[in-house]
């Protein structure tokens, strides 16, 4: 289970007022000069210091130790994704082996239309968290409806699939240049799979809503 980063998140929220200077992995929001991506998974890692907090000059070994340390993935499990970023030549660091997080926003390379928490490039900003876009998805996921049965605290695969489908349908409706590229068709279900897998609770067979809220919400700014 990938509990570690989420216990860090919960701790840093509860202890926000007592932040220990020595807590390497305390949550700090990005500074204006820091580089952040359209990917909440990577932004969370930088905001908690598992990746350089600057979000800059990240190489594959930093990425491997971050996903291992924070999410408990096998270090090389997501090499393909990092290498994809290198292969697309989207780096602006001046070193072909490293990326700045913001480099990942280049449209139709890895970034695509119909994201869950970002708007489409057509509307001007495909990088930053968009509260309106995420609000509609959070509503579909019933993220704030947690009373009653225990299962109301979890996002199932079926709920996540329906929420993604609804978001893609809405993006197609409002964006006249929506690009259902090959990249969008494979990447869009892929990112939904990735957040479920990363936050999966093996005991319940679903992802806790509290973690999904933190992951896409303030944690990933
Ligand atoms: C550490 C594990 C990772 C997790 C848990 C993760 C999770 C996610 C999720 C859930 C999204 C969808 C965001 C949304 O729809 O609003 C996303 C998007 C994205 N991720 Fe990651 N990701 C990870 C690693 C990576 C890596 C290694 C790369 C490339 C170097 C990457 C690049 C991207 C990009 C470019 C997007 C934007 C796609 C879009 O337009 O929606 N991610 N990621
Ligand atoms: C990236 O750059 C290399 C070296 O210049 C080149 O061989 C390759 O085709 C480029 N890849 C893309 C996707 O443009
Ligand atoms: C580019 O980055 C790699 C990986 O961090 C590093 O090993 C290499 O020395 C860097 N190259 C230059 C020219 O700085
Ligand atoms: C749609 O995406 C593909 C890449 O998957 C790209 O070649 C094409 O130019 C894009 N079309 C538009 C209208 O942006």
Image (cartoon, grey):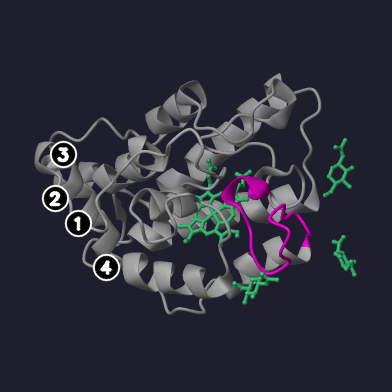
Q: Residue at x 69, y 61 (%)?
A: 85
Callouts 3 and 2 close, C-beta under 8 Å: no
Left or right: residue 59 versus residue 152 is right
The local secondary structure at tag 1 comes to: loop
Q: Which residues are magenta?
A: 88-104
Task: Give the alpha-carbon distance from disc 1 to disc 4, as whole Å.
Answer: 28 Å
Q: Residue tagged by mark 4?
A: 202
Residue in the foreground of this view, choosing between 129 and 171? 129
Residue at image position (68%, 46%) is 111
- Give the labeled residue for mark 2: 20
**Quadrant position of the N terminus in the picture:** bottom left
Marks 3 and 1 sit apart, C-alpha to C-alpha, by: 12 Å
Q: Are marks 2 and 1 in contact (CB under 8 Å)?
A: yes
Identify residue for label 3: 16
Local secondary structure at mark 2: loop
x then y, percent, for residue 42: 48, 54
Decide which of tag 3 and tag 1 comes sooner along the chain. 3
Q: Nearer the viewer, residue 151 or 129?
A: 129
Residue under pointer 1: 23
Residue 152 in the magenta stretch? The answer is no
- Total marks in image: 4
Q: Quadrant of residue 71?
A: bottom left
């Amino acid at each position: 289970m990938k509990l570690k980063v989420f216990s860090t998140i919960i701790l840093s929220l509860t202890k926000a007022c007592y932040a220990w200077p020595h807590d390497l992995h305390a949550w700090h929001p990005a500074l204006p000069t820091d580089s952040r991506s359209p990917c909440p998974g990577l932004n969370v890692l930088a905001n908690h210091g598992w990746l350089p907090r600057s979000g800059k000059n990240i190489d594959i070994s930093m990425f491997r130790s971050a996903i291992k340390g924070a999410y408990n993935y096998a270090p090389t499990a997501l090499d393909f994704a990092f290498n994809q970023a290198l292969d697309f030549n989207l780096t602006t660091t001046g070193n072909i082996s490293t990326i700045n997080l913001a480099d990942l926003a280049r449209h139709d390379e890895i970034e695509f239309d119909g994201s869950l928490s970002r708007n489409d490039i057509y509307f001007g900003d495909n990088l930053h968290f968009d509260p309106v876009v995420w609000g509609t998805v959070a509503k579909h996921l019933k993220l704030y409806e947690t009373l009653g049965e225990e299962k109301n605290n979890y996002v199932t695969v079926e709920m996540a699939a329906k929420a993604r489908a609804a978001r893609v349908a809405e993006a197609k409706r409002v964006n006249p240049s929506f690009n259902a590229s090959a990249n969008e068709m494979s990447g869009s279900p892929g990112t939904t799979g990735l957040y479920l897998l990363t936050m999966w609770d093996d005991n319940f067979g679903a992802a806790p809503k509290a973690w999904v809220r933190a992951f896409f919400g303030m944690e990933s700014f």
